[in-house]
Every structure is written in structure tokens, then in C-alpha cells.
Amino acid sequence: MFGSAAAITVAIPAWAQDDTAAVRRSGPVTITPYIEASQVVTTELSPASDTVTYTQLATGVDAMVTGRNTGGSASIRYERTFGYDDKVSDSSTLSGVIRGYGSIVPQAVTIEGGALATRVRVRADGSTALAGLGDRAAESRTYAAYIGPNVHTELGDAQVNANYRLGYTRVDAPDVAPLAPGAQSPDIFDDSWSQSANIHIGTRPGQPLPVGIGVGAGYTREDISTLDQQAEDFHARADVTVPLSSSLAAVAGVGYENVQVSSRDALRDANDVPVLDGAGRYITDGNSPRIMAYDVSGLIWDVGVMWRPSSRTSFEAHVGRRYDSTTYYGSFAWAPNSRSALNVSAYDGITGFGGQLTNALAGLPTDFSANRNPITGDMTGCVASLQGGGCLTGALGSVRSATFRGRGIAATYSERVGRTSAGIGAGYDRRTFIAAPGTVLASANGVVDESYWASVYASAEIDRRSSFMVNAHVNWLKSGFNNGADATIYGASAAYRRYLIQGLSANAAVAVDRIDSDVVGETLSTAAARLGLRYDF
């Protein structure tokens, strides 16, 4: 369940069992390393008028493994930028995404993992969007990785499913200023460790009872370095699945949950002013007591429906009580044919930025092609795949350090016809922050950040020697911090590639990028063009 801090487990009827792991197609290992050299010109269109040029040298690899017991995809790129004056400083960037799995015991025990390195544009209120063309001072580099085992076995008529996941996330501090004189600078996330463990034992309807029954438990914890924040969630529940027809079932569950969020305060000087480190982050006072920010325990329940009329269509929707309030979550997957796929996911969970991002990373498909900005080489937020949902944009919506309740929805549609591949993603993410009273983050408690986003991409082979690709994205950001400065960020790019000889290709690209903001001085329009050569080994 995308973005959820602790997934609720339910029994799944026989007709709804996903046999994907058993039928993953066999195929070759594809590894394509490359080197690239490019010349880039970037022009600021407004509010100023300035043009800079610089050289890019890059090396990377795109890989895909598809087998009966292993599978995964990776796109990794290291880039070095060389400026000609003080307008563009020399810099290096690592970007990419990896997602894969391997079987230790076929059909029983697998290890899965993933990693992400990307850049985002950080606004003065802590909200974020994809990195732009000309605002390197406000960009932040974000890294995340996770790994863990999945276990599936049988005990008589009962199915046993268990998993464990360990994740780590780090964000480099960007150079951002407060929104207004006297306003507080945003508290940017530093790093965190997240863990989750779940187990569920259940029977299918008709094996042996007319209904399916199950019991399960789950535990999640995120340790956030800023103010030593801890978010813990334990739940245990029983559930029942009642078939209504050959393709439709009603599901219900009831149980107990205990959720706690706590932190310490910042170190303060003699004037009671919080002390900051060299990166502008609060220094934790290790001697301060742990203060509870959120403590809810008691009965949880939900009811819902599951519908699977064919192997290409599945739908489930749940409503219930959790976190001392109403909760909704669900998903819809539809593959009308082998060339197209639609996926929708609604989520609800209490977590920090690191937990949200590793959950989203774990939700990526293992069979994908990465979409990149042809000028900067950065990830665009979505990957191209017919296997499942493939966007991380919503999870990157804010890099504030405070724990939050995240709710939202994400949808993707992908299609591949002949030599053409295209897709679109859209979503909404809402974060209600949770912070302990009496601490430096107290003012964040109850504040809401919202982001709407959409992304579209397409690529096609023109002939055996040439191809093109286009990307476009838009983000609408609305923050409750610092008087709620709204922003609209959008951009588009196009690239053309022509093979000159075996392995060697010439590349050309153009892009535009704009941010419209309520903040004085933040509105910016930029255009860029690139010419380069690439060699694929």
C-alpha cells in the first residue's frame, strides 16, 4: 500500500491470489553501459536575462534482468559539470533508481531491495518539486535505499505470508532562505532509519470453511535524526473474507493498534534560542526528556470489497477507523491487453519523510525504463512500465523533518505500441504534520502541506537509426507554513537521438522550466539546449 506506515493485512480469496511471482517471464540479462559528452547552454528568461554555458561529462548504465527466480531494473548515472566562470561552478551528481528481487528458496523466500538518488528543488517553506534548470542553489540531493526478505509458505490449508524491510533515507541540506524577514527557515529532513515487519496467516474461502479467515500483526518504526524523533506503530487484527460471487468478495477486519510519535527538544543557548549546526539544522539536546507528540491506541476496524473479474483486472476499496479517525485506502489495476496498464492507489499512514519515500520506492515495478530530463540527466519522477504504478513524485512533495500523517492518491497509465512507449501519472498528496508541544517544532503541529502533480512522457523510434522522447510535468504546491506561499512549477523537454555508427550517437535536446510563486523573487523562467555525443558499449 503506497505511502502507508503500516499496511493492514487481510485474507485474500482464491480467485484473488496474485501468481505473478510464479509466472514472471524468462528472458536475457540486458546491461547497457555508456559514456556521454555534451555542451549545454542555459538562459534565464525572467526575471533577469542571463546566459551561461557549461560542459557535461557523464557515465552510466541501464540494466534489466528478467528471470523465473530473479528480476529487476536499474538506471544509474554519474555526471560531472565543468563551468567556464563563477556563474556555473564545477559539480558532480549521482542519480538513478534500482528495484529488484532474488529468490533464495523458489516460491517461498525472496530478497527484494531498491535504491534512489535524485535532486529536488526545495522552496523556502520546505515543499519540493523536481529539480529545475537554473536554480542549483535551492536544490537538494536525496538518497534512499531499502532491503528485506519476503516469505510465503503453507501450513495445511493456511497461507503464511511475512516480510521485513529495513530502509535508510538522507537529504542534503539546500541553501534556502526564509519566506519573509523574521520568518523561520524550514526545518529540513536530515536522515532516518525505518523498519517494518508484517505477518499474516489465513485461509481461502472453501479451504476448509465457506469463508476465508485470518489473523495478522505488523510493526513499523522510523527513527529520525532531527530532535531524535520516533514514530512507532503496532497493530494486530483478525479478518474475514466472504465470497459474494465468483469474482466479488466482501472483506472486514477488527483489531488493536497503538501509535506513538515522540521527540526531544533542540539544544538552546543562554538566550533560549535553538542552536543550529553548520547546515542550518537544529542540534538535538540529548539531555532533554522525550516528549510525546501523538499517542493513540485502541480498536481499529475496516470493511471493504475485493473484485477480480479476470487476471487482468483487480479492485479493492476499504473504509474504517484508524488513527482515531476515519480512514480510506484501496487500489485498482487494469491491463486491458499486454500493451497497456492502468494503476490507481489510495493510501493513508503515519510516517516521516524517509518512511514515505522507501514505501514508494518499494512500490515501484521491477521491470521498467527510467525517464530522465535530457538536459540535466535527472530522474523525472516516473518510470515507464507495464507492470505497475511507477511514480515517486508524491513521496518527494516535502522534505520537512516533522513526522506526518500522509494521505493521498496516485494514478498511472502506460502504453506500448510497436516502437512507441507513452504514459501519464497524476496524484494528490496531503501531509498533516505532527510535532511535540514545548519543542522547537511545536508550531508545525497540525499544519498541512498539499501537492498536486502530473507527469507525461512519450518516446518512439523514428527508424532504425533515430528516436525521440518528450517529457512534461506540473506541480501545484500549497503549504500551511509561513503564510501559505503557493507555487506552480512546470516544465517540458524534448530530445532527439541519431546513431552515427555502431554504438555512437549524436544527441540534441531542448527544455523549458518555470516556477510561478507567491514569494517575491522566487518566480523564475529558464530555457536550455544541449548537443552531445554518446557511446553505448
Image (cartoon, rainbow, N blue to C red):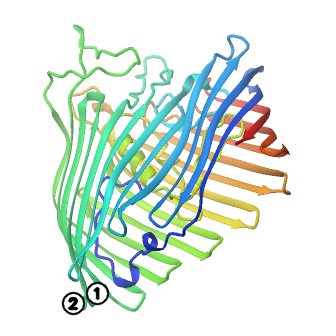
Residue shown at 23%/39% (left/top)? 230
Q: Which residue is mark 2?
A: 209
Q: Position of residue 400 (x, y in %)?
A: 40, 34
Using the rendered view, name the quadrant where residue 194 is placed.
Answer: top left
Cβ–Cβ under 8 Å for marks 1 and 2: yes
What residue is disc 1 on? 205
182 left or right of 390 in image: left
The answer to whether residue 131 of the structure is visible from this angle is yes
Q: Amino acid at mark 1?
A: Pro
Q: In the displayed structure, does residue 531 sit left or right of residue 162?
A: right
Spatial separation of the CA atoms under disc 1 and disc 2: 6 Å
Q: Nearer the viewer, residue 206 or 238?
A: 206
Left or right, residue 198 beside residue 531: left
Sort mark 1 into few (<14), some (14-19) or many (20+) by Cα contacts within 10 Å. many
Q: What x and y, as percent, mark residue 379? A: 60, 42
Q: Is residue 386 above or below residue 172?
A: below
The residue shown at (85%, 52%) is 465
User: In which quadrant of the rendered view does residue 401 lie?
Assistant: top left
Amino acid marked by disc 2: Leu
Q: Is residue 473 above or below residue 9?
A: above
The residue depicted at 69 percent of the width and 65 percent of the height is: 416
Q: Position of residue 375 (x, y in %)?
A: 71, 35
Specify the quadrant that holds the N terminus. bottom left
Disc number for residue 182: none
